[in-house]
Amino acid sequence: MLAIFDERQYLHRPLTRLAGGVLRPSPEQPERIASLLAGLEAAAIAVQPPRDHSLDAIAAMHDAGYLDFLRTGFEAWRALPGTGPELRSSVHPSRHMGRLPNDLLGRAGFYQADASCVLVEGTWEAARASANTALDAMMRVVVGDHAAYALCRPPGHHAYRDQAGGFCYLNNTAIAANWAASQGRRVAVIDVDVHHGNGTQALFYARPDVLTVSVHGDPAWLYPYYAGYADETGEGPGEGFNLNLPVALKSGSEAYLAAVAKGCEAVRHFSPDVLVVALGLDASRDDPFACMDVDEAGFRGMGEILGALSRPTLIVQEGGYPSPTLGALLTSFVSGFMARQRR
Ligand SMILES: [Zn+2]
């Protein structure tokens, strides 16, 4: 397995998130990268930088006005008097009103789903590098590398066509999956992050050419709350090509892996040319969000189950936050994956 990483991803350094009614330090920090790189090294996986690609594959999945906001919003914000180091809105469109205004703070509210996806000085450059990393890794898988890991940060799976959310700006997983589909490949995405892959689901919801499967904590009690339920199965030609497998919060490895195995049955039935694993490590019992109780052996088992599908596979890093075991969880997952994947 090869791994791709771009150092420009260090440039995004959000300061705070709103938690418990208080602004607290954001856990989606560049320091995550060091843990993940150590995890790869322990698994003897070499890391190389991506080649730079044009914006085309990103623009195919994201709205032009939204991309313009991500690219220029922070600079415009800092040019206004009295503004702070993070662009964050407290006003958002609702089910009763949803027009796109001209005002910068109004546009921020339109394009930011929640308070955890602030724009800071390096956000655009890092988010673009993160998406480019996933895309480049996918290009390698499509030309014949059997498996690649994309160290992507900021993560992507909560990002919609025109909305950031949950620390995510550009949907790295969806951009890579859509590019493979544009090359005539049949693609399945399986998302094992503890939070539902709502952005990825939405981007492919009406499409039969990309299967989306998500295993996650029950959204009745967990972010993103408003999507991720079992009765969301796709629409129009995409009906039957989205599978949500919510798991009760605080479940252990057995229950979480049973859901992953069920997701893999759907993937087998779909028979993709390329598999994309949206790898969140935050179902861990050690994760600061403490939503699930999966242990380190559970992550190895998860890697084994997904590796046993033996498809050309792109693994894209999603969530998983600073803890003493973050790197070891990645080592366990990729080791399990490589042990089972047959060419
Ligand atoms: Zn997550």
Image (tube, rainbow, N blue to C red):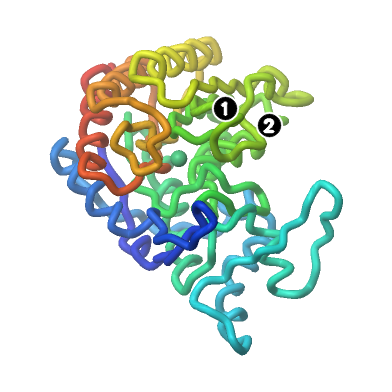
Asked if residue 289 lies left or right of residue 239, the reply is left
Q: Residue at x 75, y 26 (%)?
A: 235
Q: Residue 197 appears at what percent x and percent y?
A: 54, 36
Residue 275 lies, with reference to residue 139, above or below; the image says: above
Q: Residue at x 48, y 27 (%)?
A: 190
Quarter that holds the N terminus = top left
Quarter that holds the C terminus = top left
Query: At label 2, which amino acid type do we have?
Result: Tyr
Q: Residue 335 appears at what percent x and percent y?
A: 21, 27
Mark 1 or mark 2, which is nearer the start of the sequence?
Answer: 2
Q: Which residue is mark 2?
A: 205
Asked if residue 292 lies left or right of residue 160, the reply is left
Q: Residue at x 49, y 28 (%)?
A: 216
Query: At label 1, which amino acid type do we have?
Result: Thr
Q: Nearer the viewer, residue 316 or 187?
A: 316
Q: Residues within 10 Å of mark 2 (few under 14, many from 20)?
A: many
Q: Tell me the SS state at disc 1.
A: strand
Q: Which residue is mark 1?
A: 212
